[in-house]
DNA sequence: TACATTTAAATGTCTGACAATTTAAACGCA
DNA sequence: TGCGTTTAAATTGTCAGACATTTAAATGTA
């Protein structure tokens, strides 16, 4: 672990990178303890606050965890799916909200990814994931549900669909795509009629998966995509006519 | 922006979260300048080093950027695709390397996601992406290529395939999946025979996309997946027989 | 006006100190 | 001896204050 003395960048950034490299390359393995802050400061010939800034950078990426007290210190963290989900969702949400992604593009990406899951989901769906989907469908039919709650339930339904594929890597990759769409979806006002239509699509998808009919599920998803797209376009058009 | 005085967690973590919330919720908008470190320290009633640790956490997630000098400071960063790619890849790579993901599961996820792109790629592939794919295929045929270079070229080919879909959100989501597979792929020794087979599949995929034949591309991808899987299994089996 | 200089504001870094937390070892007692 | 309690040491968390460095605006000068 070395840093370049000629580099003009922040020392804390350089040190963070050096340690990150050591972790990624396997020089530091999971649960291994890093040297103490004082030792790191000596090693890199910087002050302790600088080392601490570097460690906080790594902690923000869940690369390390710290523990106080004797025999405490910084330890290489095993990145869990849960932590990875979280980062994935934060990043994806910000990317979408900050880059004026069109509803169409985001929608297309989301449904393309979900369609990738359906063949696997049709094979492997469990009573558990099917029950989750049914429960969310039921909730979506409740009158008096706010648009936000309806969208949240929509996300839960689609996550259950993704999880049905029984591939944690796939679930992880898609968590961001599905979840990050929620703010965009939240902008849509769901009339009773459109909710009914969406519930219809969801029911078709759940039925198809229950019957292991991948084709039918895929078709229903594609139609749902088309429907969502028209809903989104109507909203955008209305907004263009009457900007708040 | 407030922090809970009863919270026992690190102050720097709490402050980072408060600022992150302000960004995500839109209270702080892109390119807006945050208060200076001294002002933030006053506001949260903590010392400047603590504020700095919080800011470094946010910088590690590309949420802010800092500039020195008069009229410098911390600014809300517009998360670019490039930065998002980078984080996505780091996270996905670590997740795979630290969690003993089986080759089969990772492979399945990767090809499922790529298949999601093929219909769009068949419609929208440009001369540019096709040329990239052809160039990588050519490179893969070169004798004397190391296994690592072969894998790197493989990744480049698949990224071109993904980019062909012409949907940046999709490209972003898949960058992690494809790139993160590389370390796993690097463990495979590619014989001349297996390279030839892979180049064959790649050629079929490129040809199919050039002819806008989505079905054919999808079939070739599926066969490539099956072939990759057998290669991976052979390697794992050999390793199980003779652990180093 | 154009260019050099000064100045002020901000981040980057250092030093030294103390607080809080945690564990292991030392200690005392039955 | 064995067990509970206390103590000590190590480590991170936080603070205060100082100085260095960078940057751009303000100022002065030809």
Image: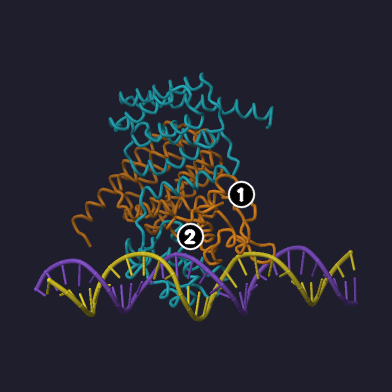
Chain colours: A cyan, B orange, C yellow, D purple
Q: Which chain does the numbered disc 2 sit on?
A: B
B204 in relation to A198, above or below: below
Q: A232 or A49, which lies in front?
A: A49
Tell me, yes or no, if residue A53 can be seen here.
no
The residue drawn where x is 31% and y is 25% is A210
Characterize the local packing of mark 1: few (<14), some (14-19) or many (20 or more) Cα atoms within 10 angstroms: some
Badge 2 vs badge 1, beta-carbon distance below 8 Å:
no
Label 1, secondary structure: give it: loop
Question: Pointer 2: residues within 10 angstroms few (<14), some, or many (20+)?
Answer: some
Task: State the residue at coordinates (50%, 43%).
Answer: B171
Question: Is residue B204 left or right of B81 when viewed as pictured?
Answer: left
Q: Which x, y percent locates residue A150?
A: 47, 29
Name the N-terminal-most of marks 2 and 1: 2
**Quadrant of image for the N terminus of chain A:** bottom left
The one nearer the camera, B16 or A86, is B16
Using residue A170 as the reference point, say whether residue B159 is left or right of it.
right
């Amino acid at each position: 672990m070395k840093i370049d003395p000629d580099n003009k960048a922040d020392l804390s950034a350089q040190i963070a990178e050096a340690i990150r490299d050591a972790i990624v390359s396997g020089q530091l393995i999971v649960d291994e303890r890093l040297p103490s802050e004082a030792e790191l400061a000596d090693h890199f010939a910087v002050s302790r606050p600088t080392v601490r800034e570097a460690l906080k950078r790594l902690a923000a990426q869940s690369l390390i965890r710290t523990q106080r007290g004797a025999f405490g210190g910084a330890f290489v963290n095993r990145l869990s799916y849960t932590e990875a989900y979280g980062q994935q969702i934060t990043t994806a949400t910000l990317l979408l909200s900050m880059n004026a992604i069109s509803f169409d593009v985001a929608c297309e990406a989301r449904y393309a990814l979900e369609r990738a899951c359906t063949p696997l989901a049709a094979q492997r769906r469990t009573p558990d994931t099917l029950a989750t989907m049914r429960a969310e469908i039921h909730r979506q039919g409740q009158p008096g549900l706010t648009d936000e709650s309806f969208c949240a339930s929509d996300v839960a339904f689609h996550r259950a669909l993704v999880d049905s594929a029984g591939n944690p890597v796939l679930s992880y990759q898609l968590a961001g795509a599905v979840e990050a769409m929620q703010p965009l979806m939240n902008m849509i006002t769901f009339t009773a009629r459109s909710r009914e239509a969406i519930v219809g699509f969801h029911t078709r998808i759940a039925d198809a998966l229950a019957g292991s009919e991948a084709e039918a599920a895929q078709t229903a998803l594609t139609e749902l995509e088309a429907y969502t797209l028209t809903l989104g376009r109507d909203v955008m058009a209305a907004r263009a006519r009457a900007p708040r």
